[in-house]
Amino acid sequence: MNIKSFLFANNTGTTGQVGILLLRLFAGLVMAFAHGMGKFPISDQLIAGVESVGFPMPVMFAYAAALTEFVGGVMLALGLLTRPVGILLAFTMFVAGIFIHAADPFQIKELAFLYMFVFIFFACYGGGRFSLDNKLGSKV
C-alpha cells in the first residue's frame, strides 16, 4: 500500500472492509452483551420505564427493546440481515435517546445517539464484504 492510496482510499479496499468488520463486531457485541442481555429477565423497572414514557402495551415494548438489543446485536455482529437489523436497532436507540433519557443531560443521551448513527450507517451500507449477508447473497 502506498501513501497516496492510504490517504485517499475509499472504503471498497480490504482495509476499509476490515474497518467495517471491526465496527460491526464491536457495536453488535457490545449492544448484545452490555445492553441487551442485561435486560433479561425483563424487570418491573424496565416495564415501568417504558410505561412512563407513554408507550401502550409496556410489557410487549420492553420485550421488543430487549430482544432487539440482544438478538439484533448478535445478528449485526454476524452481519446477518444487517440492513433490517440496523433499522430496528437505530429506532430502538432513537427511542432511548429521545424518550427514555429525555430528562437526562446530553452526556447521558449521547451514547444512545452515537449507537443510533452507527446503526443508521449499517442500515444504509450493509454488512460489508466480511459478513454473512455477503456470503449468503453471493449464492442467490
Image (cartoon, rainbow, N blue to C red):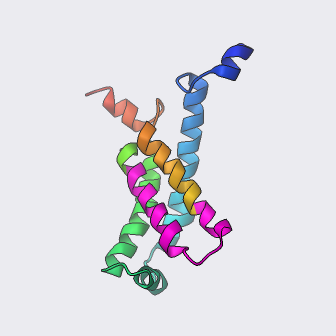
Q: Is residue 46 left or right of residue 135?
A: right
- The location of residue 66, given as percent across then percent down, is 43, 68
Of 17 and 111, nearer the camera is 111
Of 17 and 33, nearer the camera is 17
Q: Please, which residue is most extreme toward the left here? A: 140
Is residue 50 one of those drawn in magenta?
no
Which quarter of the figure has residue 101? bottom right
Which quarter of the figure has residue 123? top left
State the residue at coordinates (61%, 61%): 111
Q: Is residue 62 left or right of residue 24?
A: left
Is residue 97 one of those drawn in magenta?
yes
State the residue at coordinates (45%, 67%): 95
Q: Please, which residue is most extreme toward the right here? A: 3
- The location of residue 75, given as percent across then percent down, is 42, 50
In this rendering, the answer to whether 85 lies above or below 92 is above
- The location of residue 106, given as percent across then percent down, is 65, 67
**Count of residue discs:** 0
Taken as a whole, is the magenta stretch helix, strand or loop?
A: helix
- Residue range in magenta is 85-111
State the residue at coordinates (56%, 62%): 112
In this rendering, the answer to whether 108 lies above or below 19 is below
Residue 30 appears in the rendering: no
Residue 101 appears in the rendering: yes
Which quarter of the figure has residue 2? top right
- The location of residue 39, given as percent across then percent down, is 48, 73
Of 102 and 30, nearer the camera is 102
Q: Quadrant of the N terminus?
A: top right
Q: Quadrant of the C terminus?
A: top left
In this rendering, the answer to whether 90 lies above or below 121 is below
Q: Is residue 129 left or right of residue 11?
A: left
